[in-house]
Image (tube, rainbow, N blue to C red):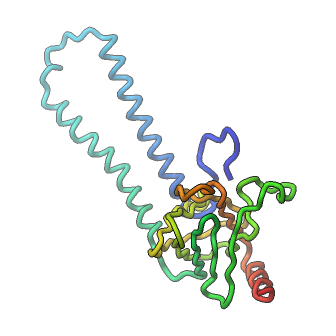
Amino acid sequence: MAHPSQLGLQDAASPAMEELLHFHDHTLMVLFLISSFVFYIIVTLVATKLTDKYLLDSQEIEIVWTFLPAIVLIMVALPSLRILYLVDETSTPHLTVKTMGHQWYWSYEYTDYEDLAFDSYMVPTQDLAPGQFRLLETDHRMVVPENSLVRLLISADDVLHSWAVPSLGVKFDAVPGRLNQTTFVVSRPGIYFGQCSEICGANHSFMPIVVESVPLEHFENWSSLVLEDA
């Protein structure tokens, strides 16, 4: 999760987020090189007395400054398109979870199981246990197995919401009357926090998301316990 004075993005917990981090670093390096080159040109123009008459008209330099930006755009566009297709790739999922956004809580339904569904509310500040995070902890976590392809079906019951977990590289809008779909794989066990990222009313800041990744055998034990309690 994010921490105070953090400059970069959160640590990746999924292959998609790792690709996004690499693309972010790649793009920043391109921007740094362009900015350095432009700064050098500006300093040169200010500090140098221009006496070369051929600088006023040159076909060669016009060709360079036409093709060079095109090459730079290709260097940025190709990795971007690759990641876009990777993120949208949907193969056979190991688990399907349907999440519905409400004002102001999330509900989860594990469609591969019978009667495995629950609502997830934010834990009030006065009820937090030691070590829990204010405005981020929920009474019921979305539990998924690690290294398993999870399909997430996202919709909303009332207004626009957005299901977003930065560490997993997932952010999808929850639109009433529409079912959006995405997939993700959690690379390692852990607890990953997110929040609704679409302004949805007075308590928009109070509908967090908590995804807990556990080994497969622990997930099976958890699902059995939840079904027994139901």
Quadrant containing the C terminus in the rendered view: bottom right
The residue drawn where x is 38% and y is 24% is 39
The residue drawn where x is 65% and y is 88% is 113
The residue drawn where x is 60% and y is 85% is 111
Where does the image place residue 198, in percent across and percent down from the top left? 52, 57
Apparent side of residue 149 relative to residue 77 in the rendered image (left or right): right
Decide: is 222 above or below 210: below
Where does the image place residue 117, in percent across and percent down from the top left? 67, 81
Residue 182 vs residue 189, the one in the foreground: 182
Residue 96 vs residue 216, the one in the foreground: 96
Image quarter of residue 49? top left
The residue drawn where x is 60% and y is 65% is 103
Decide: is 172 above or below 8: below
Return the residue found at the far right.
130
Q: How many marks?
A: 0
Where does the image place residue 74, in percent across and percent down from the top left? 32, 50
